[in-house]
């Protein structure tokens, strides 16, 4: 009976949402054909089906707001679900959602405005605009240009310092926050693409240095005010817009796990490097912004040509002319080539994409950190899917993508270095790949067609180009993974040996022999080291995606002590073996202890688990 009631409720709810999600210009509703070939009416029906399916599902969903436009015309706006389930507050035109990384496009638009005015050179070293000595962890003297920051190839690894704060009073100025979380530079600028929140925020700070204004103030004056966006905030605490500040408190976030709804609360986490992802506002405002980007009037620029240059490719798949990135905006291949940006925060996700040719665009915002079907299914409904025949022919050769690839967007220096080796992908799992020539592959991944570029780096290594980052091929990945595995196994073995020794001691059967104490110390050190490694990951995950300096220092010092103890233990038992002892069983124990202590030393040093000062 409960199940029948739930289905009836879902149907009624879907009907209500179908009525409320009416396009603004209903009289022209049936005349609008989307790039996918679907009419606006069919699109609305598909969304009603998604809403029905999600509402009928036991786990349910929170909310989604969806908007479609074509040029200056708003074709469709729909509001689904609730921004506060407990208090029954529905999603509507006054609901505010976080943009996430869509915020970065405000940086790129601002940079192009200043370039148009001759105040910013996109190919000039940004250090010439920044305060002297601003960067402290650079590995290369090569210039870092605004184009490097736009293409996310300035060379920085992912920062391991916290990039979120829960106390709005703890947020410092943009320059101070950037200095506090500066990551290591591990690639030469221009060589490897690795999506970087830090790099984008640096670009926002460059805007501050060039204009003499806070980035937030500049955007309000030159973008928001120009477009009449009165319901969007940019400051990390939303204090730049009192209306948004109050509305944001009403939007809750939700997770759905194993059929259970998890109320995450308002998730008012603040991103101090705010140009990278702090914008928050209504669907209507984000739609206005997206429409302005493709409008023939180019209201954000003095000349339409500047807008056209902004959408011209600055990074390409392989050696082809197929654009991957255009001055910070990302291209994707669907039924048509679309451009835009998506975003995610601890509170939800959003997507803003458009076809520059037909000027058709889509905006979706949800209050679920893991997203939902409204976010994932709608792009194909609006823009179609990539047809294989667009790039392939009957003579296309199959490509060999075998090997293991590590994400360039990861941590390669410091105590979290091991994480990148847990995120590798096998080329064999990418699906069948067709070689399109010019270093471009078409792969069939999970039933969907997508392009992948092939890249050769100056040092002779190679990698694959995916949206927003490279995947670097590592020929020795399995060896490194084996080292990490053996490191963990030595700790597991140490636990068992200590348990056995304790049991023997309890029954008065323990044999005391030369070096047993130092071997016990080595076993304890191995266990402590692995626990410290796990702790570093837990702290990173639970402390706003970062390791505070103090916590890192404690963990790093623990690892140093473990190295010292393991070294003494290994050296001692190696000496006992070399001293010519004839007891075979005892020698076996010494050998196992020596090897068991050497492996952790190698792993700790190679994976830099003790390095806490340069992460």
Image (cartoon, helix red, strand yellow):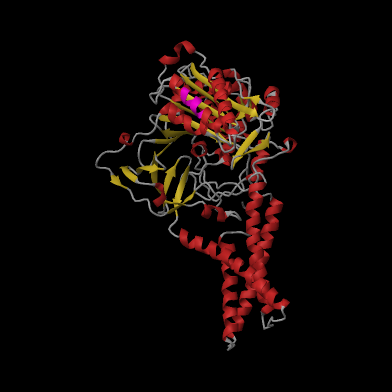
Find residue 82 and report its image quarter: top right
The image quarter containing residue 395 is: top left
Q: Can the viewer see residue 252?
A: yes
Where is residue 372 drawn, in percent x and y?
A: 54, 34
- Which residue is at the front of the view, 590 or 469? 590
Q: Residue furthest left?
A: 395
Q: How many marks?
A: 0
The quadrant the N terminus occupies is top right
The secondary structure that dominates the magenta segment is helix
Percent x, y of residue 397? 28, 46
Q: Position of residue 507 (x, y in %)?
A: 71, 79
Q: Is residue 382 above or below residue 348?
A: above
Whether residue 577 is visible to the viewer of this picture, yes or no, is no
Residue 423: give x, y in percent of width and height.
51, 51
Residue closest to the eye, 2 or 460: 2
Residue 471 vertical position relative to residue 49 in the rendered view, above or below: below
Relative vertical location of residue 129 with respect to residue 245 in this rendering, above or below: below
Q: Is residue 493 left or right of residue 353?
A: right
Which stretch is magenta?
45-50
Q: Would you say residue 340 sits in the magenta stretch?
A: no
Q: Is residue 46 magenta?
A: yes
- Left or right relative to 542: residue 400: left
Q: Residue at x 60, y 49 (%)?
A: 137
Q: Residue furthest top?
A: 27
Toward the viewer: 215 or 101? 101
The residue furthest right is 169
């Amino acid at each position: 009976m409960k199940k029948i009631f739930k289905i009836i409720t879902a149907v009624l709810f879907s009907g209500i949402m179908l009525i409320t999600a009416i396009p603004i210009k209903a009289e022209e509703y049936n005349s609008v054909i989307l790039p996918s070939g679907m009419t606006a009416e069919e699109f609305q029906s598909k969304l009603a089906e998604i809403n029905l399916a999600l509402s009928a599902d036991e786990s349910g969903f929170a909310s989604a707001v969806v908007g479609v436009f074509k040029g200056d015309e708003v074709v469709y706006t729909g509001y689904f679900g609730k921004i506060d389930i407990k208090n029954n507050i529905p999603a509507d035109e006054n609901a505010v959602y976080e943009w996430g990384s869509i915020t970065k496009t405000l940086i790129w638009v601002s940079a192009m405005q200043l370039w148009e005015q001759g105040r910013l050179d996109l190919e000039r070293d940004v250090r010439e605009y920044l305060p002297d000595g601003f960067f402290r962890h650079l590995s290369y003297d090569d210039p870092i240009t605004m184009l490097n920051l736009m293409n996310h190839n300035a060379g920085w690894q992912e920062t391991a310092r916290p990039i979120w704060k829960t106390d709005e009073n703890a947020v410092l100025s943009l320059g101070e926050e950037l200095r506090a979380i500066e990551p290591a530079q591990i690639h030469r600028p221009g060589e490897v693409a690795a999506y970087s929140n830090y790099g984008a925020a640096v670009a926002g700070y460059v805007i501050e240095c060039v204009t003499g204004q806070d980035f937030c103030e500049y955007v309000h004056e030159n973008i928001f005010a120009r477009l009449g966006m009165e319901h969007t905030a940019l400051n990390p605490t939303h204090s730049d817009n009192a209306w948004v500040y109050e509305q944001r408190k009403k939007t809750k976030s939700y997770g759905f796990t194993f059929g259970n709804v998890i109320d995450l609360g308002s998730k008012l986490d603040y991103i101090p490097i705010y140009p990278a992802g702090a914008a928050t506002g209504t669907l209507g405002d984000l739609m206005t912004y997206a429409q302005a980007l493709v409008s023939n009037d180019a209201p954000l620029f003095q000349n339409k040509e500047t807008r056209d240059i902004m959408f011209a490719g600055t990074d390409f798949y392989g050696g082809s002319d197929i654009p991957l990135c255009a001055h910070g905006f990302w291209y994707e291949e669907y039924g048509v080539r679309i451009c835009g940006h998506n975003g995610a925060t601890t509170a939800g996700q959003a997507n803003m994409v458009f076809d520059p040719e037909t000027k058709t665009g889509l905006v979706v915002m949800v209050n679920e950190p893991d997203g939902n079907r409204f976010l994932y299914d709608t792009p194909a409904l609006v823009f179609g899917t990539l047809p294989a025949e667009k790039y392939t022919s009957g003579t296309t050769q199959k490509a060999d993508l075998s090997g293991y690839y590590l994400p360039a967007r990861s941590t390669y220096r410091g105590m979290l270095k091991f994480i990148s080796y847990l995120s590798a992908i096998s080329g064999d799992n990418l699906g069948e790949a067709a070689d399109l020539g010019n270093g471009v592959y078409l792969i069939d991944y999970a039933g969907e067609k997508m392009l992948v570029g092939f890249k050769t780096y100056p040092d002779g290594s190679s990698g694959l180009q995916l949206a927003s980052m490279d995947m670097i091929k590592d020929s020795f990945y399995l060896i490194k993974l084996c080292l990490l595995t053996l490191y963990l196994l030595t700790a597991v073995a140490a636990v068992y040996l200590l348990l056995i020794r304790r049991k023997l001691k309890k029954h008065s059967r323990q044999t005391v022999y030369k070096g047993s104490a130092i071997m016990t110390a080595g076993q304890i050190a191995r266990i402590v080291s692995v626990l410290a490694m796990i702790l570093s990951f837990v702290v990173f995950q639970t402390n706003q995606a970062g390791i505070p300096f103090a916590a890192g220092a404690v963990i790093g010092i623990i690892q140093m002590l473990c190295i010292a103890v393991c070294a003494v233990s290994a050296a001692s038992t190696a000496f006992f073996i070399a001293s010519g002892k004839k007891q075979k069983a005892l020698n076996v124990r010494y050998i196992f202890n020596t090897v068991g202590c050497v492996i952790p030393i190698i792993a700790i040093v190679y994976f830099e688990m003790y390095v806490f000062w340069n992460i």
